[in-house]
Amino acid sequence: MLHIIGNIALITRDSMRNILRAMIASFGIIILIAFIVMYIPFRESVKNYIESNIFGKLAINEIVIYPPNVRKNNIITPSSSIVGEISADKIRRIKSFPEIGTMHRVARLDFKTKIHVSLFGYTRYPYVPICGVNKEYMKGKVPGWKNFRNTRPVPLVAPKLVLEMLNEFLVIKNIPRLEENSLKGFPINILIFEPPTAERPEKELQVPSTLLGFADVFPFPAVLIPLDYITEFANAKRKELGIQKRGYKYIMSIVTVKDVKKLPEVSRKIKNLGLVIESQQDIAAKTNSALEIIDRFSYLVIGILLVITIISIFNSYLNIVYIRSYNFSLKRIIGVSKLRIIIEFVVESAIVGALLGSAGFLIGDRLLSYLSQKIGQWIPVLRSITLTSGTEHLFVLSILFSIVISSLSALLPAIFASNMNLFKASRK
């Protein structure tokens, strides 16, 4: 027992002398671990942001219904890709299903539309699709949703992307950023163009509106106004102009199922009508598709860092073996076994890995905390992303991962050290 304790003490004392040199040789582990520690929380934050602000969150009993020719493979569905419509007859049939609880229809105004915005002396007339939904669907999605009704001026809800783009423009012009609350009630003119006829050219109509707020309600960019206004306007123009088209198209419908167990049955019945549906499971699939793009790039970066780190540590340990060759040869001459030399070398590298893994975690965690405070200033479009620091679980994994990398990188040099030519080394 005393012999074993003495050997352990000797190994420990000898190893401590070489740990500093080995830590310098394995410094790349810190960069690798810090990157991973920052990436994992960043990925989770991006996932939550995508679910909440791009695809939207569906309740487990909700189904989104699209026209039959919608391009569902897009990660973000532009409104222009919804070229078809859900017929009023199919809307009525779905609403008549006994399993259906509530139904919210989304219609797009079937006229060419722009919005007229003037701010700080700058004027813009972008083409924007105008969509309508009922007030009840806006509950909880935008402050002041109760005012989202068919009044004059017309209440308007814009995508959050508009606010981010506006602030990006203001930053370029050295104008202070605007907060969402400061723009509520801002006047905006909706421009609707009546189609030309044989008797008259295209006519522009101005519809005064006020900004109610910003919200990413649907997975496509569009300005939202009350559905009642769209149907009222379209019906009036159809009578006035004597046109055949209805003046608006149902491009989406959100329904809830009374009993979640009936969700597969209801989904099947809607699909039998030739429509495309999207449920919580589809949202998860789209989120995963978006994250897969991020993951592939990040895995490439991690892979490159890992290869560079392993090669660097391997070469550094080979250099250490050469420097300590005389020490190894003496141990072999006095009868130290090859296995013991290998164990000593690997244990040293494991200690170094644990120390550098801890340092990498702490550095990555501090950088993540700093990044969470500054990312909104550097990249305004990412202001809504909340970065959370790593957990104790991630700390333990960082240390174990670092130990494995360091030990594996040192294993082959350790074998070289144990098989060193005793005669040549002793002559050195």
Image (cartoon, rainbow, N blue to C red):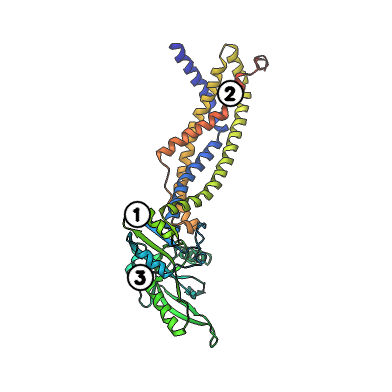
Can you tell which of label 1 and label 2 is closer to the viewer?
1
Q: Residue at x 47, y 56 (%)?
A: 382
Instruction: Assign a secondary structure to mark 2.
Output: helix
Residue 20 visible to the viewer: no
Q: Is residue 275 above or below residue 227?
A: above
Q: CA distance from mark 1 to mark 2?
A: 64 Å
Instruction: Assign a secondary structure to mark 3.
Output: loop
Q: Earlier in the sequence, mark 3 or mark 2?
A: 3
Pointer 1 residue: 262
Q: Earlier in the sequence, mark 1 or mark 2?
A: 1
Q: Residue at x 52, y 64 (%)?
A: 81
44 sits to left or right of 405? left
Residue 84 visible to the viewer: yes
Quadrant of the rendered structure where residue 314 is? Answer: top right
Q: Earlier in the sequence, mark 3 or mark 1?
A: 3
Q: How many marks?
A: 3
Task: Give the residue type at disc 3.
Answer: Phe
**Which of 201/378 is in front?**
201
**Which of 210/5 is in front?**
210
Determine whether label 1 and label 2 are within 8 Å by CB: no
Q: Is residue 120 above or below residue 273?
A: below
Determine whether label 3 and label 2 are within 8 Å by CB: no
Task: Report the disc number at residue 148.
Answer: 3
Task: Report the disc number at residue 414.
Answer: 2
Task: Give the residue type at disc 1.
Answer: Lys
Percent position of residue 264, x then y: 39, 53
Q: Is residue 323 above or below residue 109?
A: above
